[in-house]
Image (spheres, grey):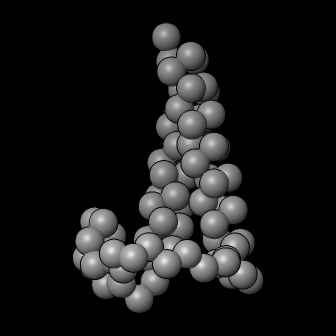
Amino acid sequence: MENYFSIALIITSVALIASIILQSKGVGLGGLTGGGGDAGGVYTKRRGVEKTLFWITIGLSVLFFILTMLTVMFGQ
């Protein structure tokens, strides 16, 4: 059972990394590390694919947290 949690955790983490990278559009590699952004902090409303990707990222992070807790609890 622990192997299933580990495999699910790996798949979820790869999907979470991919969804985070896809959200940093048009800022280049500097945007992935926190640099290269607009210092003014212009906020725009998310629409369409951006909004969907945002909610997918939140869902994947919650799933990652739950899988991590289950792996720790059942791994003992």
| Rendering quarter of residue 39 | bottom left
27, above or below 73, in the image: below
Residue at the far bottom in the pictured view: 26
23, above or below 57, in the image: below
Left or right: 75 with respect to 49? left
Q: Nearer the viewer, residue 25 or 65?
A: 25
Q: Nearer the viewer, residue 9 or 54?
A: 54
The residue located at (71%, 72%) in the rendering is 52
Q: Nearer the viewer, residue 52 or 6?
A: 52
The residue located at (41%, 88%) in the rendering is 26
Quadrant where the N terminus sits is: top right
The residue located at (44%, 73%) in the rendering is 41
Q: Is residue 68 visible?
A: yes
Residue at the far top in the pictured view: 76
The residue located at (52%, 58%) in the rendering is 16
Image location of residue 49, percent across then percent down:
69, 81
65, above or below 74, in the image: below
Image location of residue 17, percent across then percent down:
45, 61
Image location of residue 61, percent across then percent down:
58, 48
Q: Nearer the viewer, residue 3 or 22?
A: 22
Q: Is residue 8 visible?
A: no
Residue at the far front in the pictured view: 40
Left or right: 58 with respect to 43? right
